[in-house]
Amino acid sequence: MSNSSSITEFLLLAFTDRRQLQLLHFWLFLGIYLAALLANGLIITAIACDHRLHTPMYFFLLNLSLLDLASISTTVPKAMANSLWDTRAISYLGCAAQLFLFVFLMSAEYFLLTIMAYDRYVAICKPLHYGTLLGSRACVHMAAAAWGTGFLNAVLQTANTFSLPLCKGNAVEQYFCEIPHILKLSCSNAHLKETALVLVSFLVAFSFFLFIMLSYVQIFRTVLRIPSGQRRHKAFSTCLPHLAVVSLFVSIGTFAYLKPPSISSPSLDLVLAVLYSVVPPAVNPLIYSMRNQELKEAIRKGIS
């Protein structure tokens, strides 16, 4: 038994104990990480350099790519280093920093996806007011609000998590430091306030999800009333990538955190953690560029 004052490091969950599989995991994660860096970097460069893409939709997409780059850089490099050097250790401060950055970036990304839904709602349902409601200053304020809200949520969650006495060892049953698995190390009667904070965060997240769904109900009602098939196709092409990203983000995260305890296991938790921490940052650029001709042309122009 130990308490939080005596813990100097945590032990993360290893993907495997076999050396060959550890090296395979390293190379696999390295390939995914480099692909995510390249894809998100191309989107950021294309949007920043092409003046045709200096619109609210692409401004928010640029912020999303920045968040994806930062979030995958929070978890994957440490996991690769642990596999390469055959270790599980992460320092106490390193664990706190990793937890803070992960909560910060995931929260900011979710808030930003909500803002992007509002952007699509205004563009399709209130096109005459688009320039007024989503001017350059308003877009900067919205993006800053997403980053700031994520930062505030991360400060509260991290401070409350690491203020609890940890008396169940230092082995984290996950490949990176995450709130639910740190809470499992706390004393059984000491995490009530953290549970309450998580519940409040869930209610806030659900309200944002409800806003996104209501926005898309209005969007689809408006699009289906458009007489021109070409305009209807163009409207859908700007909405479906965002809806796909939201669905991927919410579905994996919801199942990971709200799955029944009866089916919970370390191996399932590990697979789900990879799905919601590694897959979205690598896949989001593909989803957004697949149906977006303007973005693909800007990327081709930048490469050539």
Image (spheres, rainbow, N blue to C red):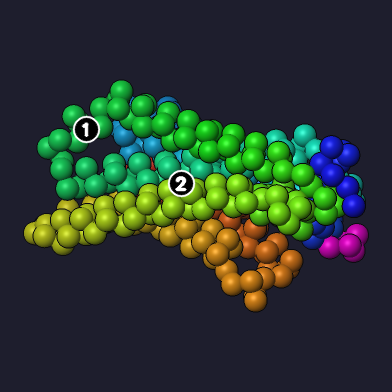
Q: CA distance from mark 1 to mark 2?
A: 21 Å
Closer-to-camera residue (7/131): 7
Query: Would residue 163 be visible to someone looking at this image?
Result: yes
Q: Which residue is mark 2?
A: 110
Query: Would residue 62 be visible to someone looking at this image?
Result: no
Q: Quadrant of residue 224?
A: bottom left
Tell me if mark 2 has few (under 14), some (14-19) or many (20+) residues whose alpha carbon lies within 10 angstroms of its own: many
When the figure is inspected, residue 223 is found, relative to residue 163, above or below; the finding is: below
Q: Which segment is the magenta one? A: 16-21
Q: Residue at x 80, y 56 (%)?
A: 13
Closer-to-camera residue (253/52): 253
User: Total number of numbered labels?
Assistant: 2
Closer-to-camera residue (158/278): 158
Residue 105 place in picture, x, y as percent: 55, 40
Q: Amino acid at mark 2?
A: Tyr
Which sits earlier in the primary sequence, circle 1 or circle 2?
2
Which element type, helix, strand or loop, lies under badge 1?
A: helix
Residue positioned most to the front: 189
Left or right relative to 18: residue 172:
left
Q: Which residue is mark 1?
A: 133
Residue 109 place in picture, x, y as percent: 48, 43
**Residue 260 falls within the magenta-colored stretch:** no
Residue 69 place in picture, x, y as percent: 58, 39
Q: Residue at x 71, y 70 (%)?
A: 265
Q: Quadrant of residue 3?
A: top right
Which element type, helix, strand or loop, lies under badge 2?
A: helix
Residue 104 place in picture, x, y as percent: 56, 38
Q: Amino acid at mark 1?
A: Leu
Q: Quadrant of residue 144?
A: top left
Residue positioned most to the left: 227
Left or right relative to 295: residue 32:
right
**Residue 17 falls within the magenta-colored stretch:** yes
